[in-house]
Each structure stands twice: as structure tokens, then as C-alpha cells.
Image (cartoon, coloured by chain):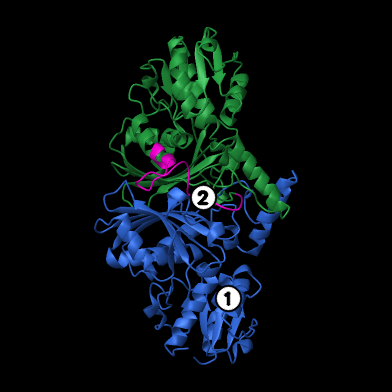
Chain colours: A blue, B green
């Protein structure tokens, strides 16, 4: 495999730091990227982990200078010409890029990695997902806010806040992103739209409630799906046990199931609590946990790059 | 209204303490109750907030000595001859008691208070509920464990545990109660069975994932219902705005929705995030929060007693 020059834009953020860590683990030589067109010269790949505005402005410049952009922001995900790729689900879409490939939102990534192996053998017609999302999904300032509030709570001091609209320690908040006229917040709509695009399933019915919880790293999701045909929990477990990127942890009687502290720092998407959804004859319920900074962001982007390198396309 | 003698069995627990607080707020004279048949003599009402075994053994003794037992434990809830009562939903069932009336599990109470007003005008055919439950639902020792772990985390000390199978601070755990062969935990099955009994809706389809979160007081529930006929979120909001025991808090664009820190210490069941469930033509999604120690336990029992007193039946 030839050596490529990689730049990371937005390297100081929470996801950026995880990017650098994973690149180091994988012994990948890392270059530098700045904020102008000049600095993209000589780079084969630029991992964008900046905000939507920066990405909207600079990604086309990087692409025009000959680099492949793999973008973590929301800027390009739903642009029809830009592939939205999770290597375990739709690797073939990566080949269709025109200089920019988008990675999905963290809550979507772990959902599609867990559901795609099932969908392939028994098409999913409807998904209901309610999430328990870590503060690191908001960014480094939110992690600091949870830590500060935890210290304040422990010292019986006044709890201060600036990132979230309400206290997050000892609390949960059903608001992630901004609200639309339909009463859904943007994080919920990302789950709907990105899942449909990645799984090439525009007609799949999907509803979500996304909730911030006082956890540092690791998103959890309670998932209820309806399938085209009945399928036993055992069959689902078998399919998922052989699926790439998935780790089944499912012995609840021994308190073995995924949870954030167990999944943080790991690469896999963890699935447990697999059971018949007793409210529907073709229903399956499950519990999905993954490190939102790794598979939810940085790792997925690096896997997209590795996929293209393996095919000689990068 | 005549004066009655009230005993509280299990007064030292988390729910027991809340019982005593509410009785004091309402200026109700409180007696004492011990642990033998003798001590129930002279009491008109005994509020049981002990565990299942104690309740199974002592409630019949108290009833035989002439007291009405209102029981918070799981011991009698599903016994066909014992009414399971939430005053806002099925007050008429309270009259049918034979000495024992049961109150539901905390997660059920807030669910049925929020759903019954809708079900009355547009029968609910299916419910999916995923919960975010406070540690006080487990008891006073669990509250202490969360507090201790929070202090340990803040001091960068080793986190110790004895109540929960895994660390609860900075974590969430999809396990409440014990697991059955069907993969559901007992808390989830309580939601299913108790909701059907209270709402006199044995055929309602229901599935739940119950999850413990690092919150002291206040259970939250992401709820998705399917109705018999289409119904707009505005109509649901109107119905709930006039419903007894319900408080609608629903202006998400201004970050106004229910959350545990807001609902704790309050008597109402708070409902917000009311929206069309975009995955179903007759679906409604919502977010329900209530103080699990008050309406979820002590307050409900006291309201049952007040209901019978108002009718001269106690």
C-alpha cells in the first residue's frame, strides 16, 4: 500500500484529537492542514472535522487542489452527489465521489452498522429509536461543562452552565440540535434522513427521540424495528455475530449488555438486549452502544480512506 | 370529611419518607404502624411502602384487622381481585376493593396518566416506551451510591459499587429488575401488564426498554403511540392541557420541555415534545417526566385514599 499524505482540519476539537490518536495507533504518517487553499497542496487526503460553515467553504477548495475530502460535518451529507458512507454498509458508494465523501452523524453510524446486517436478510420497514447520547457529541466544551458541573455538584456549589440550556449533571435533556416546525430536533432528522440515504431505503419509516445524558463518551440507543418477515431473536443474534464491526454482548441475566463505559475507547458497535418486540409480530427490540468519537466519527472516516486505499483509489 | 387514623409501614425508606412529607403538607394526622397484627388495630388506613415479601405477609393481616391497605409494592398488583388504581385513570376500580388496593410501579403511573386522556378519545392500539429512570426508584441505598460515585469521580478516586452491577455515574444501564426468559426485565413487564390492567385494555400492544440513568429523582419516558384514528399534535396537546394531573410543557424551540430536575418535587405528570410520529400515519410521539417518588409512588397512594374519603368509603 503506497504512502499518502494526510491532513487533519480541525485537529484540536474532540473528534480531531480522536482522529490523531487513531492515525497514530495505525502508524499512519500525519501531515498538517491550515485554513487556506494553499495549505491543501501536496495532500492526498484531508480529514475534515470542523463545523458546517468551515466545511462548506473549504472542502471544495481542498477537493479542487486534488485532495480527497472526508468530511465529518453536516455540510455535505444530504447533497445528492456526495456519497454518505459507512464502510460496513455501503462501501460501493465511496467509489462514486467527486472529491468529497461525507461521514454520517454519530448516532446514525452506530444505528446503521447494527441494522444493515438484519436489513440485508429481512428488509426493515420501520425503525423507532430513542437515544441516550454522551456530551462529547456536542464537543470538548460540553465535556468540560459536564466535568465542571460534576465538581460543582460534589462540592455543593452553584452549578453553572454555558453550553446546554439546562443543567446536564443529574439530569437528561430531550434536545439535540435545533428544532424544526415538525417538532423534531435536527439530530432526530439526521437519523431519519441519513439512515435512508446510507441504506438506500428511501421508504423506510423512522422516528426518533434524541436525548442528552450525563455521560462523557458513548452513545446508547433503544431500537425497535419491524421486519418484512418474522425473525427470532436467535436468528438476529446469529446474523449480528457474523457482521463486520458488530460485537454482540447479550447475556442480560448475568448483567452482560453494552453500556457507555464499556464501549468507550473501543472500535466496535455493541449490540445486546436482543429480543422479540412483543408489541409487533415481526418486531425486534435491541440496545446499541458505540464510542461516538471513534466509530461515530473519526474511525469511520479513516475506514473510508483505508477502503479506497485498498482498492488503489487513493 | 371525618378524621381517620393512618399508619405508614416502611416509613424509613425513600418512598416512606416522601409519604410522610406529603401527609404533613396536607395536614393529615399520621399514626404509627409496626410489624405485627396487633399494631394495625385502630387504624383505618395503612400505607404500605415495604418490599414485596413484607407486603405479601402483612397486608392481609392489616386488612383483616379492619384497615384499608394501599400497597406500593409489586406483591398484589396483578392479583385479579385487587384493584390497581391511578385516580386520574380508573377511580371506579378503587370501590371494588376487599381490603387491599395496589398502586402501580412508578414508570407505569406517569405513563397511564399521560396516555389515558388520549386513549379515552382515540383508543391507543400500540405503545413503545423507552425510559430514563432515576436511581431513587431503586431506593435510598441507590441514591447514596450515585452520590458516593459522583464524589469519587470528582476526587479522581476509585469508583465503588454495591447496589448496581456496574458503575452508574457517567453511565447508563439497560437493566431494571430481573430478566425473564423472553429477554425483558421485570420493570419492562410491569409497564406492559400494569398499563393493560389499569386502562382495562388487555389487547393493547406494548413494548418497553427500561434504562437506569445517573439522575437522583424524576423518571423520563420517550413514548410512541399508535392511535385508532389520525390525530394532530395540536389536538393531543389540547386534550392533555385539560387532563387532570397533567401539565403540558411544550415549546422546544425555547428549550421548554419536561426534564427530571424540573419535575422533581412536583405533583404533576409533565408532557412535552408532542409531535406526529413520522413513522406511522396514526402515530404520536411525546416525552413524559414525573417525580417517581411522589406521583410515582406516595402521592398516588394518598390520592387513592382521598378519593375514597371523598365518597365516604373510608
Magenta segment: does it hold A84? no
Residue B231 in the image, given as x and y percentages of width and height: 34, 43
**Boundaries of the magenta span:** B169-190
Residue at the far left in the pictured view:
A229
Report the front residue among A188 and A286: A286
Residue B274 in the image, given as x and y percentages of width and height: 44, 45
Q: Residues within 10 Å of mark 2 (few under 14, many from 20)?
A: many
Residue A280 in the image, given as x and y percentages of width and height: 29, 48
* Mark 1 lies on residue: A22
Which image quadrant is residue B197 in?
Answer: top left
Q: Is residue A27 above or below residue A114?
A: below
Are both tags, 1 and 2, on one chain?
no
Identify the main secondary structure in magenta.
Answer: loop
* Mark 2 lies on residue: B173
Residue A283 in the image, given as x and y percentages of width and height: 31, 52
Q: Is residue B227 above or below residue A198?
A: above
Q: Is residue A5 above or below residue A48?
A: below
Circle on res. A172:
none
Amino acid at each position: 500500500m503506497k504512502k499518502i499524505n494526510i491532513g487533519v482540519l480541525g485537529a484540536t476539537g474532540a473528534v480531531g484529537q480522536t482522529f490523531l490518536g487513531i492515525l497514530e495507533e495505525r502508524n499512519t504518517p500525519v501531515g498538517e492542514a491550515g485554513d487556506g487553499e494553499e495549505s491543501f497542496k501536496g495532500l492526498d487526503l484531508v480529514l475534515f472535522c470542523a463545523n458546517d460553515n468551515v466545511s462548506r467553504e473549504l472542502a471544495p477548495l481542498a477537493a479542487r487542489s486534488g485532495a480527497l475530502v472526508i468530511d465529518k460535518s453536516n455540510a455535505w451529507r444530504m447533497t445528492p452527489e456526495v456519497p454518505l458512507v459507512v464502510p460496513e454498509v455501503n462501501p460501493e458508494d465511496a467509489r462514486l465521489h467527486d472529491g468529497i465523501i461525507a461521514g454520517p452523524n454519530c448516532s446514525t453510524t452506530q444505528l446503521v452498522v447494527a441494522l444493515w446486517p438484519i436489513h440485508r436478510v429481512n428488509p426493515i420497514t420501520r425503525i423507532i429509536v430513542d437515544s441516550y447520547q454522551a456530551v462529547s457529541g456536542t464537543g470538548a466544551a460540553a465535556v468540560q461543562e459536564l466535568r465542571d458541573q460534576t465538581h460543582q455538584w460534589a462540592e455543593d456549589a452553584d452549578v453553572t452552565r454555558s453550553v446546554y440550556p439546562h443543567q446536564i449533571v443529574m439530569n437528561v435533556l430531550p434536545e439535540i440540535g435545533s428544532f424544526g416546525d415538525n417538532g423534531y430536533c435536527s439530530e432526530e432528522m439526521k437519523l431519519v434522513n441519513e439512515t435512508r440515504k446510507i441504506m438506500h431505503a428511501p421508504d423506510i419509516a423512522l422516528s426518533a427521540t434524541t436525548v442528552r445524558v450525563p455521560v462523557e463518551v458513548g452513545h446508547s440507543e433503544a431500537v425497535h424495528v419491524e421486519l418484512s418477515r418474522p425473525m427470532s431473536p436467535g436468528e438476529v443474534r446469529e446474523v449480528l455475530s457474523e457482521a463486520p464491526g458488530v460485537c454482540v454482548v447479550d447475556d442480560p441475566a448475568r448483567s452482560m449488555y453494552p453500556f457507555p463505559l464499556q464501549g468507550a475507547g473501543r472500535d466496535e458497535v455493541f449490540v445486546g438486549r436482543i429480543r422479540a418486540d412483543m408489541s409487533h409480530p415481526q418486531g425486534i427490540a435491541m440496545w446499541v452502544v458505540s464510542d461516538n468519537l471513534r466509530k461515530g466519527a473519526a474511525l469511520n472516516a479513516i475506514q473510508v480512506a483505508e477502503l479506497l486505499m485498498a482498492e488503489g483509489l487513493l
